[in-house]
Image (cartoon, rainbow, N blue to C red):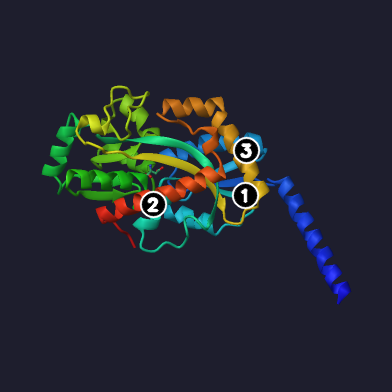
Amino acid sequence: MKLTLLRTVAGIALMTGAMAHAQSDYPTKSITMIVPFAAGGPTDTVARLVAQSMSKTLKQQVIVENVGGAGGTIGAARVAKAAPDGHTIFLHHIGQSTAPTLYRKLSYDAINDFEPVGLVTDVPMTIVARGNFPAKDLKEFINYVKANKDKVTYANAGVGSASHLCGMLLMSAIGTDVTTVPYKGTGPAMNDLLGGQVDIMCDQTTNTTSQIKSGKIKAYAVTTKNKVASLPELPTANEAGLPNFEVAVWHAVYAPKGTPKPVIAKLEDALKIALKDGTVKQRFAELGTEPVAENRATPDALRTHLKAEIDKWGPIIKKAGAYAD
Ligand code: ASP
């Protein structure tokens, strides 16, 4: 009896030692960073910049894998079921906090199936349209959309995406509804906006800035409280005629639930280094955003932020009455 107990204790000690060793060796192979939207879009852009820097720090490739569809929930579900060893991580946006209310049923729990690593950035959104859309400012845009609601098409990345959230709030603010066209991400949606196959969209500056600057699409407003330095001529929605209309998109990094604490700590360190990386900072600035302050790039800050955002958006989404199955 005693001998068995001793053997068990010794076995546990050995196992614990082996696990600790594995964790101190982490990462032992390349890391997959799941992005729950198509390549070429704004979440993908943020992820690729961060992944490149994290690869240098972690001395293993951080490879971005795009798992788009259903507004980001397909990618999230994949991460929730992945092995919790730090070799699969997740970069998602505000959708992690809106999907639990937007979807009547989700195959994962947005809080309990993930280990938070840290926040990455806050990104403004912009209200945009195809280049030849017949409205020169936000007031004309609103009038045109209302008068032509049966023919205007709104591109988004599916229920649960930021472009869906912004569009839903916009339509509810102006008291109308238009046909939505869902894509696996706003990268492909932007291609169709440029081609004139869809009419309007609301998307992150990380996807719209260069197209606005080149004049290929029309921009009517930025959805944040303050103007964006990289697009100084663009008014805020508030200034342009939509009082109190505000949406900002935050991004964050997670790992599957159960990922060991020392592994999360290494990921957190690598994320913090990425957010100080000169190339990351410069590209973020050009795209209308900036890295979060270091004290927000932590598991605790993300845990608190995610809960607060779920609580914030829940009643707003319920009031707008938008649900998906
Ligand atoms: N910007 C998209 C969204 O609407 C997602 C993406 O393609 O990155 O959430």
Left or right of residue 78, residue 14 in this image:
right
Q: Give how far across and how far down residue 145 sits, in percent.
A: 16, 41
Left or right of residue 272, residue 100 in this image:
left
Q: Give how far across and how far down residue 300 sits, in percent.
A: 55, 45
Q: Which residue is mark 3?
A: 269
Nearest to N terminus: mark 2 or mark 1: 1
The residue under the point 82% across, 65% down is 9
Q: Alpha carbon of mark 2 to alpha carbon of mark 1: how far?
A: 30 Å
Pointers 3 and 1 in contact (C-beta within 8 Å):
no
Q: Alpha carbon of mark 3 to alpha carbon of mark 1: how far?
A: 16 Å
Q: Amino acid at mark 2?
A: Asp
Q: Which mark is residue 13?
A: none
Q: Give how far across and how far down residue 190 sits, in percent.
A: 33, 39
Quarter of the image for residue 2 reads bottom right
Nearest to N terminus: mark 3 or mark 1: 1
The residue under the point 35% across, 27% down is 228
Q: Amino acid at mark 3?
A: Asp
Q: Crowding near pointer 1: few (<14 within 10 Å), some, many (20+)?
A: many
Pointers 2 and 1 in contact (C-beta within 8 Å):
no
Q: Which mark is residue 311?
A: 2
Q: Which residue is mark 1?
A: 87
Q: Which residue is most to the right?
A: 3
